[in-house]
Image (tube, rainbow, N blue to C red):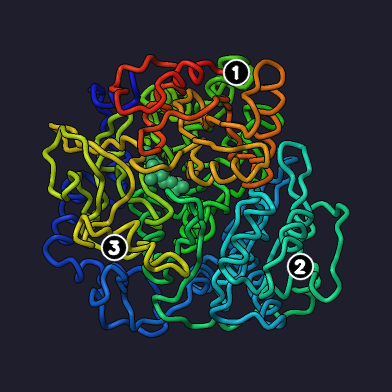
Amino acid sequence: MSEIESAKQETRIFNPPAEFAKNATISGMQAYQALRAEAERDYEGFWARLARENIEWHKPFTTTLNETEAPFYKWFEDGQLNVSYNCLDRNLKNGNAAKTAIIFEADDGKVTKLTYQELHGRVCQFANGLKALGIKKGDRVVIYMPMSIEGVVAMQACARIGATHSVVFGGFSAKSLQERIIDAGAVALITADEQVRGGKQLPLKAIADEAIDMGGCEALKSVIVYKRTGGNVKFVEGRDLWMEDVVANQPDQCEPEWVDAEHPLFILYTSGSTGKPKGVQHSSAGYLLWTMLTMKWTFDLKPNDIFWCTADIGWVTGHSYITYGPLAVGATEIVFEGVPTYPNAGRFWDMIARHKATIFYTAPTAIRSLIKAADADEKVHPKNYDLSSLRLLGSVGEPINPEAWMWYYRNIGRERCPIVDTFWQTETGGHMITPLPGATPLVPGSCTLPLPGIMAAVVDETGQDLPNGQGGILVVKRPWPSMIRTIWGDPERFKKSYFPDEFGNKLYLAGDGAIRNEQTGYFTITGRIDDVLNVSGHRMGTMEIESALVANPLVAEAAVVGKPDETTGESICAFVVLKRSRPTGDEAKQIAKELRDWVGKEIGPIAKPKEIRFGDNLPKTRSGKIMRRLLRVLAKGEEITQDVSTLENPAILDQLKQAQ
Ligand code: WT7
């Protein structure tokens, strides 16, 4: 049974535990409905109230939503604020100065704790250091760092001086890094000598050097290096500096740079349906508001919570639920450098027990791989760990299949903890469709209902609403404060991708399909409807991988499709035509390995195809269009039952059937 089918047939319902519901920020469905009704009655008034209650403004706003240049919406436009001030200084004033902000656990288990006072000081010192290097409001700074306190400090310091950061995940290749530095026009790069994951040291500075040496990064003046391991690195005189030297002698106070509500807080590159990644641009105020509200609504954050989001700061989840949201609401959070399987697959459970985590937020892929590990080795089964501190679990990044949901619910939550299956995207800034733990009855495999104020709907190709029970296109009908503002440097692409003409430029197109349950109206996400793959919760464009493959001198043509995978959700399957004759046997294996490594170099190891099949050609229509839907069937190893009469070369299908 497919995940969608099993979710549709799912009848189990889990009500919020009474005790949880009683104390929750949004307690009971009536409270949820009341907030929804408020948003429907007075949309702008609703958001204005929340923005006034949650954000500390330097200059209050007087206009809430400006739609005159739609779909380039502006929120709280004439207000001024500083995001770092809201995350740090406010906590010093609120009596949280001595509260632990970050519990950092390194790969080797070493724990470092930092109070809000200390974090504030570190951010201010670094902000002053950046200013001393001439970095100023509006400049772009690329951050290519391991999971670390310094990574969070770097992001917050940029926010403090009004520089727009663009974090590049540490697993991306030199070429990917170079492309992002160029596209953003970055004046500085913050990186580390090496990163440490699973006991292994991986170079970052060397990759950064390689990226810059590829050329085109003319705007880049400074490279700041955090010394993580003390490993050997090359330094370029006049360009490279150690982070410790940048902060040395800098005062631990730094007046924040007040910025307009719409000032771009960050750009984060993500994959779309064309080859070139899109620089998703986010605002300051609207984004901050949404990270705060979702910390309170979805995670029901309380002062004593120990919050743990296992994402990397290189992804939007790490931005919203490590760097900004938890700090803005004064939480104590865990930041983890390592991987879930080192020194063994009990690492997450052991850390929850040792740090007494109360809220745990992770990805279905991690859960599925830890289920396998627990089945294989009793010693790392969660039953051996004291998980009694937990009160809430979360899931993010990809659909969670009901089996994994149930395991998570029973073995980690011990049937006491609600699970919030949060649907959202890099573009949305924070949660969009998710249960509220003290209100929403849970159904495994469904992200349930939109948050108050989020006008999500399922429509057909013409933008008309579909009745519940009919699958269609997921859209959001009204702008919301934390939505993407534009694609950096490409406003046309922004319009085309998210507010296309077909929908009258009025509906936000998420790029996912969805279906609503006939009885409950609950949403189930049925997956991407564009050429975007989701592998282990990592988003990748098929065209990006194809471009990487055809850039190899051996390759004439390539088509990439997703294939369902038990652990990673989807895996990458590439169909390749070489310039020379089709290889078989050991030779095919050898070339496949070469091509996999090549893609790893071009994009990053996460983009390596799991499977590569060679053919003399690809299945094409008479007009030369590659028939991807057939390739998807072949990748799954299923028989083709669809109409192939428009196919130019049907014989090719037999050749591509076999996995090499
Ligand atoms: C895509 C967005 C969510 C932030 C991190 C990933 C898929 C995300 C869910 C969920 C089903 C989900 C969608 C979406 N997705 N969360 N709970 N259930 N699918 O952000 O890299 O921008 O990816 O991830 O397909 O469009 P992203």
Task: Identify the element where label 2 is drawn.
Answer: helix
Q: Earlier in the sequence, mark 2 or mark 1?
A: 2
Left or right: residue 538 versus residue 633 is right
Q: Position of residue 320 (x, y in %)?
A: 47, 56
- Tell me which image quadrant ligand 1 sits in: top left
Residue 652, image x, y percentages: 46, 21
* Residue 81 visible to an observer of this rendering: yes
- For label 3, the crowd category at 10 Å Cα-Cα, with few meaning under 14, some 14 to 19 and many 20 or more, is many
Asked where in the image residue 502 lies, by quadrant, the reply is bottom left
Observer-side mark, 3 or 1, equals 1
Q: Secondary structure at mark 3?
A: loop
Residue 424, above or below 281: above
Real-space Cα distance between discs 3 and 1?
48 Å
Residue visible at 55% across and 25% down? 615
Disc 2 crowd, CA 10 A, few/some/many (<14, 14-19, 20+)? many
Q: Are marks 3 and 1 in contact (CB under 8 Å)?
A: no
Q: Position of residue 374 (x, y in %)?
A: 57, 19
Q: Position of residue 10 (x, y in %)?
A: 26, 23
**Amino acid under label 3?**
Trp
Give the residue at x 34% y 25%: 3
Q: Quadrant of residue 179?
A: bottom right
- The mark that comes first in sequence, 3 or 2, is 2
Q: Amino acid at mark 2?
A: Met
Q: Which residue is mark 1?
A: 660
What residue did someone put label 2 on?
243
Three-letter amino acid code of the residue under disc 1: Gln
Q: Which residue is mark 3?
A: 480
Which disc is residue 421 wearing? none
Quadrant where the C terminus is found in the figure: top right
